[in-house]
Image (spheres, helix red, strand yellow):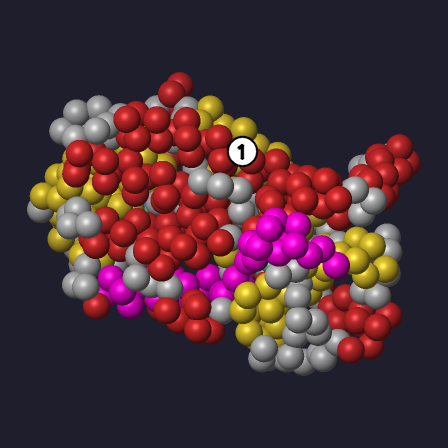
Amino acid sequence: MRTQICIIGGGPSGLLLSQLLDLQGIDNVLLEKHTRDYVLGRIRAGVLEHGFAALMREAQCGDRMDREGEIHDGIEFAIDGVRKRVDLKALTGGNSVIVYGQTELTRDLYDAREKSGGNVIHCVEDVQLHDLKGASSVTYRKDGVAHTVECDYIIGADGFHGVSRKSIPADKIKEYERVYPFGWLGVLSETKPVANELIYARHDRGFALCSMRSQVLSRYYIQVSLADSVDDWSDDAFWTELKLRLPHDVANALETGPSIEKSIAPLRSFVAEPMRYGNLFLAGDAAHIVPPTGARGLNSAASDIYYLYHALLDYYKKGDDTGIDKYSERALARVWKGQRFSWWMTNLLHKFPDHIDYDNRLQDTELEYLFSSENALKSLAENYVGLPF
Ligand code: APR
Ligand code: PHB
């Protein structure tokens, strides 16, 4: 088959771009290795920057987000048991975030693609990219039958473990990585969230986070050793440890219940440069990963899609390839700001096993400065609600 854009990966990045391009009459095919239900089974954070929410509305996929998503004007920090609210809306002159689970957002994108008859092909195997510098194509197998997609451009939106980034010659790509010496044990429970806003807790026992998916679905995390496994943590052990890391009033108000999902995720910062090689453009987790502390993963993906969408629009509608030529430079400039914020939040709130006393006093000082300076709080707030595209 022949198309203008071949998108590899049916996660939020690939789906959002596919929908945006389709609305502009730019032909695209999306190849996804798993079933739709498998993709929707992933439990991921959903704290949406206001720019991302606007992009979802532009994609005509924002109705349920606006109806069911929760607008959060602030977030809380609990520093050694003391609660401190950060008024995001006041500090940014009116911007907030929307809390709306990634699963639901991805479901809305799949529904939109299905409604408009989008060409989304699931359960593809052996995806290979060809002639990235010439007449590009993507081959794959489905149900044992070989297929070829001839296209102008390939979008690698296939996540960290996908095939796209690995299709770039090793001498043409540079990878930057930092792996953190701890993980996050996350629990999803059908309980009422302990607070109306997210609570990021720094405690001598380790980091904790109180989040939510809705008013009846809570998401909690505690920092754990990389040596831990999920089997080491019963639900009771999790709730007990979480309470120890929270302010007393929050711990006493915590509604516990059976975990419906429990997993440990490692924390990594990763960026691959450049995000373009010939006719291949990387987007989202295929090009970069952040520790979840700053809730930038999904938002960094959306940032790439914003730049890619406008670059392809300018190319196909105006014959202007400036955006295409500058995609990697523009996307990376914002990606690295998301990396910085995620790294800063992670260093601010976690207990590092290899830190010396000086490091720990520096963390205390960073927190003391943050909450004593409106300018420092404004910096946190403008990054959390989303820097301009
Ligand atoms: N062929 C086709 N599809 C593939 C291949 C392949 N070889 N490899 C991976 N995929 C699919 C995966 O099954 C997945 O559905 O690509 C999709 C990539 O989706 P994500 O990993 O969700 O990445 P992205 O769309 O960039 O979204 C980033 O997801 O991982 C979270 O925290 C991250 O919130 C952020 C968001
Ligand atoms: C989540 O709800 O899963 C979540 C929220 C905010 C974060 C990380 C995870 O910073």
Which residue, as the protein is rendered here, is positioned at the far left? 1
Can you see residue 350?
Answer: no
User: In terms of image quadrants, where is residue 193?
Assistant: bottom right
User: In terms of image quadrants, where is residue 354?
Assistant: top right
Quadrant occupied by the C terminus: top left
Residue underneath mark 1: 336
Looking at the image, how many numbered discs can be counted on the residues? Answer: 1
In this view, 10 is above or below 114: above
Q: Residues within 10 Å of mark 1 (few under 14, many from 20)?
A: some
> Under tag 1, what secondary structure?
helix
Q: Where is residue 376 shown, x and y percent of the image? A: 73, 40
Can you see residue 120?
Answer: yes
Which residue, as the protein is rendered here, is positioned at the far front? 93
Which region is colored magenta?
A: 85-114
Taking the image in four quarters, ligand 2 sits in the one at bottom right
Identify the residue shown where x is 62% and y is 61%.
73
Which amino acid, by three-letter code, is at mark 1? Trp
Asked if residue 133 lies left or right of residue 110, the reply is left
Identify the residue shown where x is 53% and y is 33%.
336
Is-magenta flag for residue 94? yes
Identify the residue shown where x is 49% and y is 41%.
388
